[in-house]
Structures are given as C-alpha cells and as structure tokens.
Image (cartoon, grey):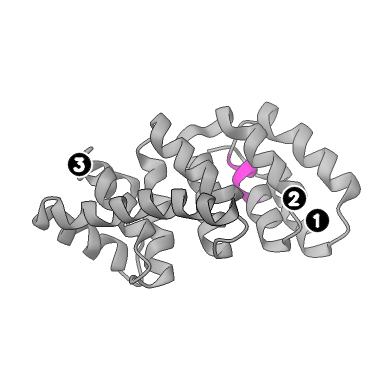
Amino acid sequence: MPGSRRLLLVLPLALLASAAHAADPALAGHLQDLLGAYEEPPTSEDLKAAGPEAVGILRAFATDPSRPLAFRARAVHALGNFPDEANRALLLGWAHDAALPGIIRRRAIHALANGWGDAEAAHIGAFLADPDIDTRMTAAQALGRLSDAARRPRLEQRLAVESNAAVKAVIVRALASEPE
C-alpha cells in the first residue's frame, strides 16, 4: 500500500513537471528569471502581472526535482499569490508532508497565510505543535500576519506550553506585530 500511495503522488507530480515545458516559453522564462533572482524575491505584483497562466508553470517549477531546492521553494511560496482551491489543496498537502524538505513545507505555510489569510488560521495554527522547531517558528510568523482575532488565541495557547526559547521569542514577536 505505501508504494501505491507514493505512485499516486508521483504520477500527478510528473504531469505537473511536464506542464512547464508545454506552457508559453516566454512566460516560463520570465517566471524563471523572477524566481531565480538572488537578491530580490519576486513581488506579489510581479507574479500577479504574469496572469493566471503562471499557475501551471509555478506548480511545475515547485515539483521539478531537477531544480535547486531554493528555487522550488520560491515557486511554492509564489502560489500563495493565486488563491484558488487547487492551490490551497496543494499547499496544504505540501505543508503536511513530513517527507518533503523543511523549506518546502515552511514556504507552503507562508503561502497559505499570504493567499488565504484568516481563513487558514486553524490549519496554520496546527503547525505550532509540529515536532520541527523551524516549522513551529514559521507557523508563528505566518499567524503574526493575520488579524488579531485569528492569531491571538492560537499563539497565546501555544506560548503557554512551548518549551523552546527561540519559538517562544517568535511567538511573542508575532503577538506584538501588526497584522498585514
């Protein structure tokens, strides 16, 4: 069963990866340049200007194992600029997949906060209990960008039981931050 489950995940990913090759080469090149910029990550405006056709290319970039991990993580994060149900489902799946590299999971959490905001507070809040310290810090940072009503109860509840000093510090900063 585990092998068949992995096959069910690999086949759609292979189809996504081939989508970048079938897409508009000029748009794929433009997105590659945006995501590959070392000093400046792409802005929300840059990504949205690429239009809805960018979504398939970003999904393909995110799942292409031949690409550098940091590039793939930027593609995951960029999907938060295109909030639809399919992207939400992909991001939630990636955020929960402990077999994926941590940076992919963490960027998916940030993308959920960016694209869906308060509507994803419960899902993002669940990552405050993740065994990985970096994932807990990411969840606190992501919640810090949401409304006070969406973040405060989750952050305060976790602060009361959190044992890691670094995570506590991020939670305190998130509680003190102004929502975006």
Residue type, label 3: Glu
Labels 2 and 1 touching (C-beta < 8 A): yes
Which element type, helix, strand or loop, lies under badge 3? loop
Q: Position of residue 138 (x, y in %)?
A: 63, 54
Q: Nearer the viewer, residue 108 or 56?
A: 56
Residue in the image at 61% along x and 40% along y: 178
Magenta highlight range: 141-145
Which element type, helix, strand or loop, lies under badge 1? helix
Residue in the image at 53% along x and 50% along y: 5
Residue type, label 1: Lys
Disc 2 crowd rating (10 Å Cα; few below 14, some 14-19, many 20+) is many
| Tag in front: 1 or 3 | 3
Question: Which residue position is annotated with label 3?
Answer: 53
Residue type, label 2: Ile
> What secondary structure is the stretch in magenta mostly built from?
helix
Q: Distance from label 3 to label 2 (Cα)?
A: 37 Å
Q: Position of residue 18 (x, y in %)?
A: 23, 56
Residue in the image at 73% along x and 47% along y: 128
Q: Nearer the viewer, residue 122 or 61?
A: 61
Question: Which residue position is annotated with label 2?
Answer: 171
| Tag in front: 3 or 2 | 3
Q: Distance from label 2 to label 1 (Cα)?
A: 5 Å
Question: Which residue position is annotated with label 1?
Answer: 168
Vertical position of residue 163 compared to residue 176: above or below = below
Q: Position of residue 50 (x, y in %)?
A: 20, 45
Vertical position of residue 144 compared to residue 99: above or below = above
